[in-house]
Each structure stands twice: as C-alpha cells, then as structure tokens.
Image (tube, rainbow, N blue to C red):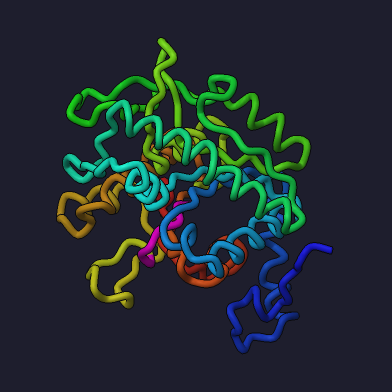
Amino acid sequence: MPYVPCCREYLGHTAMPWPAILAEALPYLQRFANKTIVVKYGGAAMKDPTLKARVVSDVVLLSCVGIRIVMVHGGGPEINRWLDKVGIEPRFHNGLRVTDEATMEIVEAVLAGKVNKSIVSLINKAGGKAVGLCGKDANLISARQTSDRELGYVGDVTGVDPALIGAIVEKGSIPVIASVASDESGQSLNVNADIAAGEIAASLGAEKLILMTDVPGVLKDKDDVGTLYKELDIQTTRGLITEEIIAGGMIPKVQCCVRSIAQGVQAAHIIDGRQPHSLLQEILTDEGVGTMITEAH
C-alpha cells in the first residue's frame, strides 16, 4: 500500500481546519482538471530526502485528481558529485557550466540515467505512474549548440515535439523529462532545465509553468521575504529587469516565464521548493506561496 500523507501534513501543519482547506481547493481542482501543468523540479527539493518525498507526493496527488503533470528536471549537484568521482573539475563561464566532451558524457549519464530513474521510481513507489524520458527520445527536444562556444556542448532549444508527452499524459501517466537533447547530427547537448520546461509548456499549451527554486519568488529586496511580489504582469516584469530589481540568476528564470506566456502558457510561477508542499499551496489556494507572472493583470 503506497504511503498517503494526511491532510495536516499536506498543509504544512497549519491550524486551518481541513474542511476549510478542501473547500478552498475545490474550485481550483475543478478549474485545472484535465489541464496540463509543467513543473521544473530542481534546487534543494531535489537534494533533501524529506523535501523530495513531499514533492513526489504532491505530484502524485495532483495527478490522481485529474491534473496532467509533466516534470522537467536538471541535476547540477549530482553532476558535480560524479564529475568529482571521475576526477573532472567542474568549470563555469559567465555562471553557466562549461560542457566539454568528457563532461557531456557524465551529464547525459547522470541526468538521463541516475537522476531521471530515481525520480521515476519515487513517483511509482508513491502510487503514481511515471515514464522517464530525455529530450533525445522521439526527438522530443531539438537543439543547436549555443553561439558562445566557450560553453562547449550546451544547447539552445530550437523546437519541441509534444506528441510523445501527449500520449503519455493521455494514459494518466506522468512524463519525467531530463534536460538533455541533441542537434541535427545527433550530438548530445546539455540544455538549461528552466528553458526546456518553458518550451515544453508552450508546446503543450499548458495552463501553468512552475519553476521550483531555492528562493521565495521575485523579491523587491532580495534579503527581505516580506517584499515578495505575489503577482506580476509581463510589462511590469520587464520594467523590474530594467530597474535591476530583478537581477543575477533570477533574470533567466523570469525571461523563461515571460517567453512561455508569450507563446500561450496562461501563467508562470516561481516558487520556493524548500517550503513544504509549496506546489499544492501555489496551485490549490487563494494565497499561493510564490510569484505568479501573467500576460496582464
């Protein structure tokens, strides 16, 4: 019998009575039934066993109530661990991993193999039905080597064929996709998982794109959680980048969200995967927990 957390555990031990929680969740469950939500899974939620179990249980719950969940993942810390095991020193250029031939072999083996199948096993153990894929399967993600050749075998997404993903979700299963793709010649390429998730969400006409990170969302003051922007539209988001309120590593995440919305995704969310059951709270409650970006207020 798979483990099913109780209502109190799903709520992060809040004092709110469970009938009120279910009443609040009901309209969202009805609204998102048979809709697709793409979740980019990463950060601390992939490393901490307790957080990992909670994310997996949330994903299985959402799938069980009829929401079509598609998971996309990277795995930077695990890649670094295996590079260290084989004596390859990780290198970075402008904050991005340099992926030479030897590193690409490790990246593909770790992401499409060890990390991907670990997530699949956890979902299956929790009572879901997961199918592990990478961008190379059925040419799901097409890519070309990035123009910055200092980065090596790093890919820019040129297209997504959603047919295989669609067939899997139609059967009630959860696709789990590693962010490895290939170019026209068959060369494996390391693709940023946020960007892969955004392009997959756009190709599926997803209701939502959710990026799980290690920050609460977009903050006016990066050191003050109380300055969280709960909702932003595209125009305001671009203004915050110009004003350098959105800066550093948050810029590519936000740009990924904006691009997915411009291609038809209804809303994009940046949430803190370290917060217990942040996925459920963002999707199924009025308050939410992170930053939601939409085309316009």
- Compared with 138, 13 (above or below) is below
Write the residue at 69% across / 62% down: 27
Nearer-the-camera pick, 209 or 174: 174
Please tell me which residue is depicted at 48% across the width and 71% down the height of the picture. 275
Percent x, y of residue 41:
49, 51
- How many numbered circles does the render carry? 0
- Residue 256 x, y percent position in the rendering: 36, 42
Does the magenta segment cover residue 246?
no
Q: Residue at x 79, y 62 (%)?
A: 2
Is 211 covered by the magenta stretch?
Answer: yes
Residue 69 in view in this figure: yes
Based on the displayed image, in which of its 4 quarters is residue 59 positioned?
A: bottom right
Taking depth in this image into account, of 114 and 183 the one nearest to the observer is 114
Q: Residue at x 31, y 26 (%)?
A: 101
Tell which residue pokes out farthest to the bottom in this image. Answer: 15
Q: Position of residue 141 (x, y in %)?
A: 49, 25
Q: Is residue 125 left or right of residue 77?
A: right
Q: Which quarter shows the C terminus?
A: bottom left
Q: Is residue 203 above or below residue 215?
A: above
**Towards the viewer: 140 or 286:** 140
Residue ranking furthest to the top:
185
Q: Position of residue 250 (x, y in %)?
A: 28, 53
Q: Is residue 201 visible?
A: no
Report the quarter where the N terminus lies.
Answer: bottom right
Q: Is residue 158 left or right of residue 173?
A: left
The range drawn in magenta is 210-216
Which quadrant of the structure image shows residue 183? top left
Q: Is residue 38 left or right of residue 226?
A: right
